[in-house]
Amino acid sequence: MYDVVIIGGGITGTTIARTLSTMNLKTVLLEKDNDVANGTTKANSAIVHAGFDCTPGTAKARTNVAGNQLYPSLCRMLDVPFRQNGSLVLAFDEKDRLHLETLVRQGQANFVPGIRIVEREELQAMEPNVSKDAIAALYAPTAGIVGSYELAIACMENAMDNGVELRLNHQVIGIEEVDDGFVVETNKQLIHAKVVINAAGLYADVMDAMVHGEARFDILPYAGEYNLFDQSTGDFTASIVFQPPSEKGKGVVALPTVEGNYLVGPTSEGPKAKDDLRTTRAGLKELREKGERAIPGFPFHKVITSFSGLRAKTSGGDFIIGDSDVHPGFISAAAIDSPGLTAAPAIAEEIFTLTMAHFPHAKENKLFNPTRRPVKRFMEAPVHHQKVLLEEEERFGRMICRCESITEGDIIDMIYRHAGAETLDGVKRRIRAGAGRCQGGFCSPRVMEILARELNRDITEIVKDGEGSFILTGETKVTETEEKETETVHI
């Protein structure tokens, strides 16, 4: 029997797992996909919001500001890239300026430090590429950018280093309350636990209905489309640049990323189906129009990929964080849309408090280590350290991804960690092989060979990302001997 089952391996579930690993609890995280950080966490703006946009008194406001303050130390401990580069919300007319003043008052009510309105002259000095039509902007110095999926992966790795278990490809299909807790049924096994934490993202309403008969809240998936630009674009702005928000949300944002690319997005359309990740002609047109409004002359010809992500909104508009009154021990961290990435560390602390109420005699994990084994990142290392790495592992000398300068040693390091890479995109999210200009056109076959060899699998078993996303289905040519020994696969 487990003490705690966490459902969902996104940024919410993985930060909760890491926080619970500070205690001597038997904890397992269930993820329906073949990797963590495989839903909303992998397709978002990767912004650490300052907290001025949240309505005062809400769970969003409370956890956004608290989470923002936790980010610098958390990312240092987990060796995850994070940069506090500040954000700007542009105003193009007096109506927009009035809205900025409202945001300032909200930010002050939420105890957001340092926010202020900058006028046109100061704005142009800060960001020369921003439209000259912008008459002012709200500046928030505590906003920042982070590697969102890298952080979730790092949290899961660190949680596993400290004793948490991970079950991938475990889709929850039923939850039954019993005398001493709950029995969680997955597509593979039954798991008995005293406490269940619902961090299932887009499917949190489905999990809630399994326990309560019908869901106590709705999850409304809203799609956001993005354009990702080649690193040669450079940092067109040093800051995160928001446009005036609308009823749809914070609006299209233009921002640098910690990886060195530039990002424009998201749109906001919905509600959608929970698996609708299409990009659309209309959405990409909107990105271009709004991107050029904020930054005239932006080089949209340098887009290297476009993608769409879904965020789990609810009609109530706020995060749902709490224990069930009817079924105590079924704890929710649901409807975590924006600013969920920012809030995740603070949400994890609140869920920790709710969970520990069920374990009053639990003891601390005296072996807890808050730091993750440093990522080696061969090409970023000083020359003297590169020599040490090459002495330890000669495969650091074999370049695999030329766009991002990733070596075979880098990839192998990511395979042999807890919550390690098992797919092409799993490698890309952890160490960026395949994330560059050619989007894996050159290195994908080599990465597949490495995965197959190190995981002791046939290369046809290696998938791009989700279950069933096979790249190879068999051989097109075989020798006469092989033809006799094996069944030929016809494509």
Image: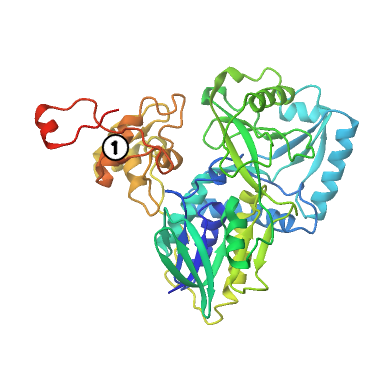
Q: In this view, does 72 lie above or below 299?
A: below
Q: In this view of the protein, which residue sits in the foreground, 353 or 389? A: 353
- Residue at 58% x, 63% y is 210
Image coordinates of residue 426 in percent, x first then y, are: 42, 42
Specify whether 110 is left or right of 384: right
Q: Name the residue under label 1.
A: 460
Q: In this view of the protein, which residue sits in the foreground, 341 or 388? A: 341
Q: How is the image coloured?
A: rainbow
Image coordinates of residue 271 in percent, x first then y, are: 68, 42
Q: In this view of the protein, which residue sits in the foreground, 297 or 227? A: 227
Specify whether 52 is left or right of 261: right
Q: Is residue 405 above or below residue 194?
A: above
> Tag 1: residue type?
Thr
Would you say residue 316 is visible in this rendering? yes
Q: Is residue 328 above or below residue 481?
A: below
Q: In this view of the protein, which residue sits in the foreground, 210 or 343? A: 210
Disc 1, SS = helix
Picture quarter with the C terminus = top left
- Residue at 62% x, 57% y is 205
Would you say residue 22 is visible in this rendering? no
- Residue at 66% x, 62% y is 321
In the displayed orientation, state which residue is furthest to the bottom: 361
Image coordinates of residue 16 in percent, x first then y, are: 54, 61
Q: How many marks?
A: 1
Q: Quadrant of residue 204?
A: bottom right
